[in-house]
Amino acid sequence: MVLFFFYKNLINTELIKKINSNFVISDGYILIQKYNNEKNILEISDNNKNNNDILHGKIVNFNMKIEDVIQKMNKIDECKFENKNTRYILNNIWANKSSGGLCNVYIIY
C-alpha cells in the first residue's frame, strides 16, 4: 500500500486508472512554498515555516509498490511536465485530507 498526493493533470480519475484501476481517492491539500501553475513549477521548502501556500489535489491510495506506481506513471504522457529540463523530485510529505486527518504521502514534482 502506497499513498500519493496528485495535483494538476493527475486529479483526473481516468488518468489515475491508467496506473491501477483499484484505488481509494480523497480530496486533500498540502502546504507548499510556491507553485507556478502556468509553468508547473512547484517548490516545497525543507523548512516548514516557509510553506505558507496551499495546493489542493487528490490523495490516492494504491495497493502496489511505489516502484510500480512510478513505472506506470512514466508511461502516461499527461504525467510528464512540459518544459522540465531537470530531474523529477520524489518527496515524502504530510498531506491533509479535506474531510479531516493527516497522512504521509509521496509527491513527484
Image (cartoon, rainbow, N blue to C red):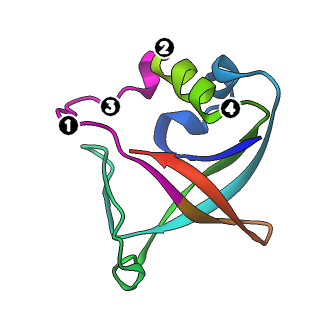
State how far apart marks 3 and 1 are (Cα): 10 Å
Counting other residues with Cα less than 10 Å from the Cα at mark 1, is it few (<14), some (14-19), or many (20 or more)? few
| Residue occupying image coordinates x 70% and y 54% | 27
User: Residue 37: x, y in percent?
Assistant: 33, 49
Label 2: state its secondary structure. loop
Figure quadrant of the C terminus = top left
Task: Say what amino acid the circle numbered 4 marks.
Answer: Lys
Name the residue that disc number 2 marks: 75
| Helix, strand or loop for the magenta stretch, by majority | loop
State how far apart marks 3 and 4 are (Cα): 23 Å
Label 3: state its secondary structure. loop
Q: Earlier in the sequence, mark 4 or mark 1?
A: 4
Label 4: state its secondary structure. loop
Name the residue that disc number 3 marks: 81
Q: Quadrant of residue 77?
A: top left
User: Residue 45: x, y in percent?
Assistant: 33, 70
Name the residue that disc number 1 marks: 86
Q: Please identify, in this view, whether the residue under mark 4 or under mark 1 is nearer the observer.
A: 4
In the rendered image of this protein, does residue 81 appear above or below residue 19? below
Which residues, given as a range, are shown in magenta? 75-92
Figure quadrant of the N terminus = top right
- Between 38 and 69, the one lying in front of the other is 69
Name the residue that disc number 4 marks: 65
Q: Earlier in the sequence, mark 3 or mark 2?
A: 2
The answer to whether the residues at label 4 and label 1 have Cβ atoms under 8 Å apart is no
